Amino acid sequence: MKKTTLLLVAAALAPIAQSFGQGIKSQSNQILSTEKQASGLVEQPVTVGYGTTKTGQDIQENTINPGDSSQVQFTLTGSRYNPVIQGHITDIFNTNRFNLPAVNGVNVTQPDLSPYQPDGWSDKIVVSKVTGTNTDDSPWLSTDQLYIDWAVLNSGTATAVQFFTSLYVDGVQVATWYSSPPLPNNSYSYVTDYSIGQLAAGSHTLQIITDETGVIAESNESNNTYSRTITINDPSNQDLTPYQPSGWSDKIVVSKVTGTNTDDSPLIPTDQIYIDWAVINNGAATSVQFMTQLYLDGVFKADWYSAPPLPAGYYSYVVDYSLGQLAA
C-alpha cells in the first residue's frame, strides 16, 4: 500500500468558541462552594467516645447486625488531635454491642485534603479567559484577563474545623479562602472565576496550597499542594501554526464525505478524498494578508489567502477541499 504524506504550510475567518462574559464570582476570603458531593457516602454516622460502646439499635439494626461486615463512620470527641476517624468493621460479635478498640480490623483514618480535578474540568487549576467555564482556553496572551478555578477534595473523614486554601502566582500569595466544617468524605470545596488579572509574557507558576495553616490533622500531610506552569504569549509577536479545533480529529482531517471534521478509515483508491485544515494565530493580530499552502507527497496542490486581521487566539480554516482519488 502506498504511503501518502499531506503537508500544510502556514477560508473563512472564525473565532475560537468563547463568550467574553463579565463579572467575578469569587472573592478573597469567601468560599463559594457548598461542599458539593463527589460521590455518595455509604457510611452510617455514629458518635462514640474512646472505649465506649454502642448497640445496634443506636445505629440501625438493618445496617449492622451480628456477624455483619460493614463500614461505619465514627466521630471521636476532643481536640484537633482527636479528629473524626473512620473505623472499618470486619467482625461483629454475636451480640448487638461492640466496643471500638475491640473490633477486629479497625482501619483508622483522618481527613485527607488535596487539590482535585472534578469531572468536566481540564485541570486541578483551570486557567481561562472567560467566566462560566471549567476548561482551559489557551493560548493565553499578556493582554488577556485570566480567571482561575480550583477545587480541594476531602478523601478522608469529615473535617471538624475551618481550614484555609491559598492561591499563589509565581510564589506570591494572591488570595486565601476558608472552608467551614464539616467537609464530608468524598466531597470537595471549590472556587470558580477568580480573576488574577493579566500576566506578563513568559512562564508563570500557579500553585494551590490547602490547609495552609495546618489546622487539620490529616492522614496524609504531603498532598496538600498542586502546581502547574503556563506560558503567556506576547501579543506583539505574530505566531501562525496549524491547529486542531475542538471536535476535529487532527490538524489535517482526511475524510471520504463532506460535512465532517473527523478522519475516515480505511481509505481505498476509489474513494473521493476531502481535506479540512486550520491555522491559529497564537500571537498578535495579523496586519497583512498571509498564504496557507497544501502539499501532497511534496507536490503543491492548493493555496489560500487569509485577509487581515486574524486576531490573537482566532483561527482560519478550510473544510471539504477535494483532493480527488489517490492511488494505492
Image (cartoon, helix red, strand yellow):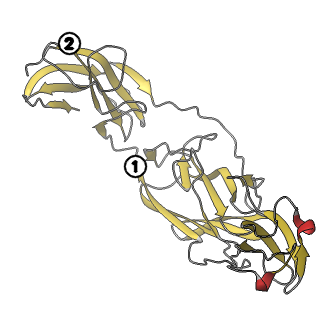
- SS of the residue under disc 2: loop
The kind of secondary structure element at disc 1 is strand
The N terminus lies in which quarter of the figure? top left
Residue corresponding to mark 2: 272
| Residue bearing the label numbered 1 | 233
On screen, residue 284 versus residue 223, left or right, reads left
| Residue furthest to the front | 94
Residue type at mark 2 is Gln
| Vertical arrangement, residue 78 with respect to residue 309, above or below | below
Estimate the x, y position of residue 20 in percent, counting from the top left. Answer: 59, 34
- The front one of 222 and 282 is 222
Crowd class of label 1 (few under 14; some 14 to 19; many from 20; radius 10 Å)? many
Q: Nearer the viewer, residue 130 or 159?
A: 159
Residue 307 visible within the image: no
Q: Mark 1 is on which residue type?
A: Asn
Q: Earlier in the sequence, mark 1 or mark 2?
A: 1
**Label at residue 270:** none
Residue name at image x 50 percent, y 30 percent:
17
Q: Quadrant of the C terminus?
A: top left
Crowd class of label 2 (few under 14; some 14 to 19; many from 20; radius 10 Å): some
Q: Nearer the viewer, mark 1 or mark 2?
A: 2
